[in-house]
Amino acid sequence: MKKVKMILMSTLVLITALSPAFATGQQEAANSDSVNLVYWSMWNETEPQAMVLKDAIKDFEKMNPGVKIDVQWNGREIRKTLQPALDAGTKIDIWDEDLERIVKTWQSYALSLDDFYGKAYPSTNGKTFTDTVMGSLQTLLRSFSSDGSLYAVPYQPMVVVVFYNKDHFDKAGITSTPRTWDELLQACSKLQAAGYTPITIDDAYIDLPLGMHLNRMYGNPESVEALVKDKTGNLWDAPEVMQTAKDFEALAPFMSPQVATNKWPAGQQEVATDQVSIYLMNGTWLPNEVMGTTGPDFRWGQFPYPAVTGGVNNNGGTYGAQGFQINKNCENPELAFALLAHLTSGKWDKELAAKTYGAPMDTSMPWPSQIEECRPIFESLDSWIPWSGGLAADTDAFPVIKAEYTRLLAGQITADQFVRNVKSALK
Amino acid sequence: MKRDNKMTVIFLTPALLSFCLVFLYPTIRTLFMSFFYVRTVTDNLGKWEFVGIGNYIKLFSSPMFRQSLVNIFNIWFWGGIAVFLVALVFSVILTSGYKGKSFYRAAIYLPNVVSAVAMATMWIQYAFSSKYGLFHSVFTFLGLEKAAAFQWTSPDNQFFAMTLAYCFGMVGYYVLIFMAGIEKIPVDYFEAARLEGANLFKQFTKITMPLMRGVIKSSIVMWSVTSIAFFIWSMMFSPLDPDVGTITPMVYMYNLVFGRNLTPTDPRLLNAGAGAAVGVLMTLMIIGVFGLVNFLIRDKKLQY
Amino acid sequence: MNRKQTLGRLPGYAVLNLWVLFTIVLVGWIVLASLSTTREIFTNTLLQSGLHFDNYIKAIVNHNVGMYFINSMIYTFAASFGIIVISAPASYILARFRFRGNKLIQSLFVGSLGIPQIMIILPLFYLASIMRMTNSRSLLIILYICLNVPFTVFFLLSFFATIPGSFEEAAAIDGCTPIGTFWKIIFPLAQPGIITVGIFNFIVLWNEFFIALIFANTSELRPLAVGLYTMVQSMRYIGDWAGMFAAVIIVFVPTFLLYIFLSKRIIAGVTGGAIKE
């Protein structure tokens, strides 16, 4: 009995000692004379992005006495927790997530920022904020919204490209990066001849090349969405689909034998550990993710997804950024926007890019050497393609297509079988 | 002893209140909600749209939901058979006078006390890796090239891989339960049987099994309840969006109600009402299993 | 024991040892990986550049593991305590006295054991949202308590039933109130059952994932299980796998030690808990 009493007592003590901590979750304005902003973050407190943001926010508080920023580090689960919290009327002034997601799903909760974009801020060097944000991202932002307004402030631009190991290309005697599918296949056979495993990818990204290929074929994501949502399966008889399947069938012999079983990050580590030469598709963040394995001196190269035979639009690509939004019910929108300007331009934009080997927002800044070849690609894309090219439009069909495509890419099934399997699974 | 009314009320009220709060009210609301189209969980009654059994029809017309039912059935049925067989063998071995009984019991149960997130990470990143993984190394060492090249986490095999990893961890729990059950059977029974020349197998089928009916029965119920809640392993094996081989009803519900992870979900696809219908179906399944088990394994008077 | 018997047991020992060995290798590899560099992990050359204990420092400093640990402690202790305070008196009343509705209440409690979480989670989330209680420690503790009351009441029934009524009568003669009698005399007598069910609840809550994932999901509120899950998730942005394996070990070790010291009690708790059903 003594033991039980001890445990009970110590629990009580523990609870009492920690009771101030119980108040977390209810943010009340602390003092009437200070201004409070609540920021729900997509980052975990321990991630490099969060560390930079934390310092930047501290800096902002110092520059604006009487302003207090409460940050709640949600991590990626914010995708699930933000909207219920907003619906319930929780005080949240600012939040962030992927640009497409925030505008498309949370536009109705957000403030239109067009007016704020036209002003200058301390970190913008006298220019208006509009002039500091990449034009392509502003166009993108407007296209995501239902009324063509700007509903977010982008940061950390990214683009999805093909990554390769420059050393391997040099040793295999490949002088220029492949621009067409045939050139890609030729490069792969040269790499194979030089003794390398040419190409690989992970389960987490495997849908990207298929989505991009179909977009090249059809010229727009809507057709791909229609394809995925087609319950009759008839659309899958199209020559574009068969051509796509045949192209990947031709690529299959060059794929790493692990490709079907690669659980992220096994595939990107194959490239990072020098075992494979090309990573079929990934985002700008890849070099940072494998930095622990490669070290900073690894010679990364990038090229855009190749043009395909019979393709309609060979200049589209997936690009975007993270973005902040301001609550339409925010009581201090000017202050909130000033904070966002502070975080996404000038000194702290630079700092964020440096700490994460990512791309800066500031167009006058060079991109880190690991991803410098991404920059011309980013600037040359003439149309935007959603992540995985619209394949994810149907939650039921997507996993089936992904599984069959994995088999195709691994050489376990032929192009004909791929089309047949998908068709029968969708019906 | 006389009953004190005041005390009865004071003592029972908190428990009853907590029951109403987290079981009674939610169960009724979920049941009700499953007949409505509800876009987000936080929508209040005013925004609900009555759709009759529309949500159920929608669920059954979704191939992924049907797949999740197939998966959960396979985990429950085949996984259950495997876990129970292995656990029975271990508990019979361990209760027949082996040295180091408590060490083995503790070691076999260990994976059960470790967070499933940690266990799943070990399996995915190490055991199943086709590069440096445990199975790969062992089979290569044994010269079994075919087995070494087995692609554990490919679309064809990942359901098997996930179930294997899950069941490995669950065995320990049932070893504990079965051992406790066997140890309650009086030793005289076995001695008498041995004197009459019954071998181990005979003893098992004629004494252990019949007397363990009750234990087995409650274990099946327990296994069913935990299987229905299969969630975390699936999330670990497909951390972004669910795969054909790993989806379970709970994951399906989670994605339907709270949105998907990787790609932004079209807000029109969110449907908390259908999520509620998944919950109702799972509850019905558990009730079904209760009924079936009670029907198949009748209580006999003598059991331990 | 004669030789023949020993020989006959060899296959049994072989199977047992293989099984245990597998567990050890699995955990052992993670230990080695947590002391290597990320490159060594993915090139299968563990420990080639010596021991890297800094992974552990990084995990503790960079990944908040300490915070998650404290959270788990708070949730588990507070909830285990709360469950007993609510369940024990109710169980006592149900076990001791006959009155209308007693059987009904008992069967409601038993029935709730079969209700999967998926059935009740949505309305609970709704309630928490409209009361603006998501993401608070107290909410999670309240939920943990309420969710485990029925099982605990049910479990303790037989323990209270076996305590002879003479204790209460004697106490009543001494002028003790019925409520006082319960806490001073009956509750201590049911101690074995209370400890057993307490340990059972403790283990269940320590590893709980789903409820915490939905109701306590910010950096400073996560318990270990969810914390580890988000750590694995955020590797996407960091790529520090050695650090992550170190985190896995940090999560693993305290549970493991506790288990080594208390394994008898834990096993008794678990078997007691399940055999009852």
Image (cartoon, grey):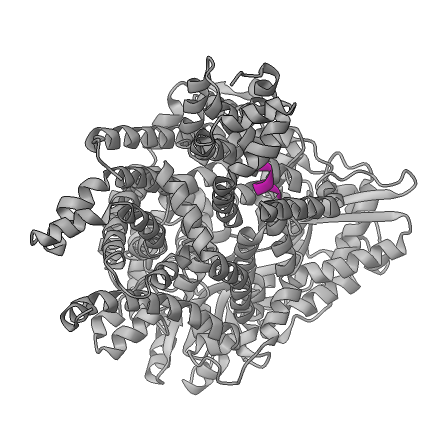
Query: As displayed, is residue A228 above or below residue C126?
Result: below
Give the side of residue B43 with respect to residue B180, left or right: right
Range of the magenta residues?
A: C78-82
Rendered-image quadrant of the C terminus of chain C: top left
Residue C127 position, x and y percent, is 60, 28
Give the side of residue A207 with respect to residue A86, left or right: left
Query: Between B223 and C118, which is closer to the camera in this rendering?
Result: B223
Query: Between C109 and B156, which is closer to the camera in this rendering?
Result: C109
**Residue C7 placement: quadrant:** bottom left
Residue C3 position, x and y percent, is 16, 73
Residue C82 in sight from this viewpoint: yes
Residue A355 position, x and y percent, is 68, 68
Residue C145 in sight from this viewpoint: no
Decide whether residue A115 is among the magenta residues.
Answer: no
Residue A201 position, x and y percent, is 41, 65
Query: As displayed, is residue A273 above or below residue C217?
Result: below
Rendered-image quadrant of the N terminus of chain C: bottom left
- Magenta: predominant secondary structure element? helix
Query: Between C118 and B91, which is closer to the camera in this rendering?
Result: B91
Tell me the residue at 41%/54% (across/down). Answer: B112
Tell me the residue at 22%/65% (across/down). Answer: C12
Query: Between A206 and C180, which is closer to the camera in this rendering?
Result: C180
Query: As displayed, is residue A144 above or below residue C239?
Result: above
How many numbered tags mark residues here?
Answer: 0
Give the side of residue B134 with respect to residue C58, left or right: left
Tell me the residue at 88%/57% (across/down). Answer: A62
Residue lying at the far left in this picture: please name it: B197
